[in-house]
Amino acid sequence: MKIKEITFVALFAAIMGALGVVPPIFLSFTPVPITLQTLGVLLAGGVLGARLGAISQTLFLLLVAVGVPLLSGGRGGIGVFFGPSAGYLLSWPITAFCLGYILSKFKTLKLHNVLLVNLTIGIFLIYFIGIPIQAFMMNISIPEAVGLSLVYIPGDTIKAVLASLLVYRLRKHSFFSQKISKISETF
Ligand SMILES: O=C(O)CCCC[C@@H]1SC[C@@H]2NC(=O)N[C@@H]21
């Protein structure tokens, strides 16, 4: 990995940590909180691309696993990977990878494409991996876990829209967009 790549990976792991400073919202009926950190997952895949996006999320999760309190509300430690949130957390590098990969297939990046990919694949993958593991950990049925996770959809939709606008602007218009696209194309 080049120095520039390491810097961007570290930056996006740090962005995840910064988003974790915003307190989570815990609801009475589910142990999996509403968190702003899903925004960081969509940003990492969209901005860094498949490989680096996934590495940044893996680095973030490794830091959490060794006990750095980077999850929203200052949580961390190996225990979170054996709780109801485990699947969602594991989905983050996979989602960043898939988003980056799919977006790299568009010749010219249009805002509506980024939006569509984030709103469908992005959110879908997180739930697809997170819900069955939540069901298993909570000893409930998958339909019950699906029912619980409906509460996240409004917030995750807003995060997907916000991430799409930021990804589009950063890749198209910002002064460092060329640097980002060069790095993210090297999947
Ligand atoms: O910090 C945690 O323990 C939870 C991480 C997973 C949160 C999931 S990700 C999809 C859904 N959207 C949210 O805002 N929360 C859940």
Image (cartoon, grey):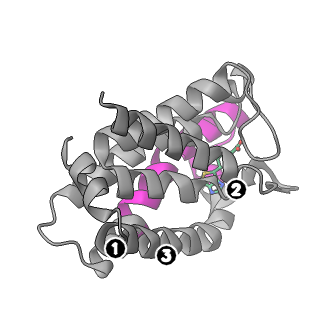
Up/down of 43 relative to 171, above or below: above
Is 144 magenta? The answer is: yes
> What element does badge 2 sit on?
loop
Q: Which residues are magenta?
A: 119-145
Of the numbered discs 1 and 3, the one sitting upstream in the chain is 1
Kindly identify which residue carries mark 3.
161
Quadrant where the image shows the N terminus = top left
Question: At x 79% / y 36%, what residue is drawn?
Answer: 75
Neighbor class of circle 2 (other Cα within 10 Å; few <14, some 14-19, many 20+) is many
Kindly identify which residue carries mark 2.
35
Cβ at disc 1 under 8 Å from ligand 1: no
Question: At x 28% / y 55%, what residue is drawn?
Answer: 179
Question: At x 60% / y 43%, what residue is drawn?
Answer: 14
Q: Is residue 7 left or right of residue 149?
A: left
Cβ at disc 2 under 8 Å from ligand 1: yes
Along the viewing direction, whichever of 184 and 160 lies nearer the viewer: 184
Whether the residues at callouts 3 and 2 have beta carbons within 8 Å, the answer is no
Whether the residues at callouts 2 and 1 have beta carbons within 8 Å, the answer is no
CA separation in Å, label 2 and label 1 = 22 Å
- Quadrant in which residue 53 is drawn: top left
| Residue 35 place in picture, x, y as percent | 70, 56
Of the numbered discs 2 and 1, the one sitting upstream in the chain is 2
Q: Is residue 109 left or right of residue 89?
A: left
Is 123 magenta? The answer is: yes
> What element does badge 3 sit on?
helix
Q: Is residue 140 left or right of residue 2?
A: right
| Residue 39 place in picture, x, y as percent | 56, 60
Neighbor class of circle 1 (other Cα within 10 Å; few <14, some 14-19, many 20+) is some
CA separation in Å, label 3 and label 2 = 15 Å
Of the numbered discs 3 and 2, the one sitting upstream in the chain is 2
Which disc is residue 116 wearing?
1
